[in-house]
Each structure stands twice: as C-alpha cells, then as structure tokens.
Image: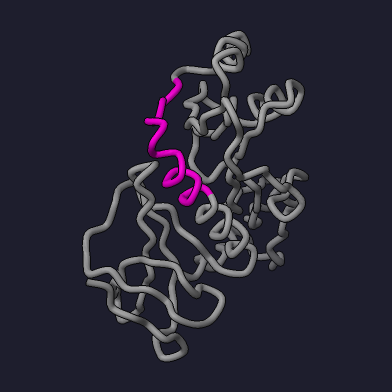
Amino acid sequence: MAEPAPIFLSAAFHQPVVRPLNPMSSSTYSPQLQLFPQRHWTPVYSRALHEYRLQKFFSAHAIPHYLPLLKRSSYKTVRSANRTYQYLQERIRPMFPGYIFAALSKDDEALAWRSKSVVRLLHQDADKQDCLLQELLLIRRLELAAQTEKLEVLPELVPGKKVMIAAGPWEGIYGVLQERRKEHHFIVNLHIMGQAIATEIDVSQLQLLEVS
C-alpha cells in the first residue's frame, strides 16, 4: 500500500525530509541461525522497548540470538516560527515488538533473567526445534526482502488456500493469496508468532502452485 502524500499546513511549500535510519541495519546484521548442542531456540518476550538492550546483553555473553528488524515509516509534524510542515521519518524497528529469539542453555536461561529485561521465556518442545529454526530462517529471508519490498506485519494468522511461489525472488515460499481492493497480497503465516507477514505482488509476473 502506498504511503499517503505529505500534507503541508502553511503557504510555503516544503519538500518532505527523509530522516536517516537507525544505525542497526538488518543488511549488516548476520544472525547465527542454526541448531546448537545443549541449546534450544526460544522466543523471549521482553519488557517494552528492551529488545535492543537484550540484543546487546546476549551479544556480550556470547549467546546466539536473532532480532528481526523492519523499516517503519511515519510522518512527523514540525512547527517552526509561523510555519508548520511534515516530514517522512524512517526507522528500523523490531519486526515483532517485544520479541527476540535466543538459543539458550539452562545456564543461559538463568543469565537471561538477570538482565532484568525478560518478561517471559516461551519454551518450545525439543522435538520442534527443526520446525522453529525453519520459521526463523523464513523470517530472516522476509526481513532481507523488506529492503526492496514493502512488508506488513499482521496481528494474526490468515486462513485461505495455500500456494507456493515457484519462481522469482520469493521462490519456494508458501503462503496465502488474498485480494484486497483489486490488489493481490501474498501472506506468509508464521505459526511461531501466531502472526503473519503480507506483501503486495503482481500475480502476472509470478508462477504460483496450489498446495493441497
């Protein structure tokens, strides 16, 4: 969905200013997404606005972790003298506010609580670690795609007939095809989070396979 055009509230015309992104860029951040002996990947629910603090804490203690990031845009209003205008502000924010993923051992769990940033550890069954890792790898792929594609995080899973993109940059990704206002959106359900990620696609440029 296209961003709304900036609204200027004074007679003088001002071009919207794009503020710089948060210096922690998803393009330079390379998480270790793999299985580790004696460690289990665990979604960690943090205190509000403590995701980056936890990321630094895990890094300082050599705990493998992953904080998915997403560029978010919003218009800010500035008033100066007798003029009022808006500018477009872009920042990198956690893709799932309040969540970071970490590969924790028993000792790491006790250490994580000492950070005073953890609200809850969402333990996963050991036999589901492979599935969890596959979803984390998928989230990473979507995170990188967001550098050129506009992605939207949805608060819940989206039902529908599953399809797979058979060619192109989204090749091999399973999701749900949905039409909104004559636009087609490809929605990837993330069961680990109980949420979904959507992007607008041109179905005429993609090869889709219906999955039973």
Expressed as whole percent of the image width and height from the top left, the position of residue 157 reads: 29, 51
Left-right relation of 95 to 201: right
The residue lying furthest to the front in this view is 37
In this view, 7 is above or below 205: above
In percent of the image, x 50 and y 66: which residue is there? 4
Quadrant assignment, res 125:
top left
Left-right relation of 209 to 7: left
- Looking at the picture, tell me which residue is in the foreground, 96 or 57: 57
SS assignment for the magenta stretch, majority: helix
- Looking at the picture, tell me which residue is in the foreground, 33 or 148: 33
Quarter in which the C terminus is drawn: bottom left
In this view, 12 is above or below 69: below
Expressed as whole percent of the image width and height from the top left, the position of residue 116 reads: 58, 11
Q: What stretch is highlighted in magenta?
A: 121-136
In percent of the image, x 57 and y 21: which residue is there? 105
In percent of the image, x 49 and y 30: which residue is there? 42
In this view, 23 is above or below 58: below
Quadrant assignment, res 87:
bottom right
Is 50 part of what is drawn in magenta? no
Expressed as whole percent of the image width and height from the top left, the position of residue 86 reads: 62, 55
- Looking at the picture, tell me which residue is in the foreground, 66 or 212: 212
Is 128 part of what is drawn in magenta? yes
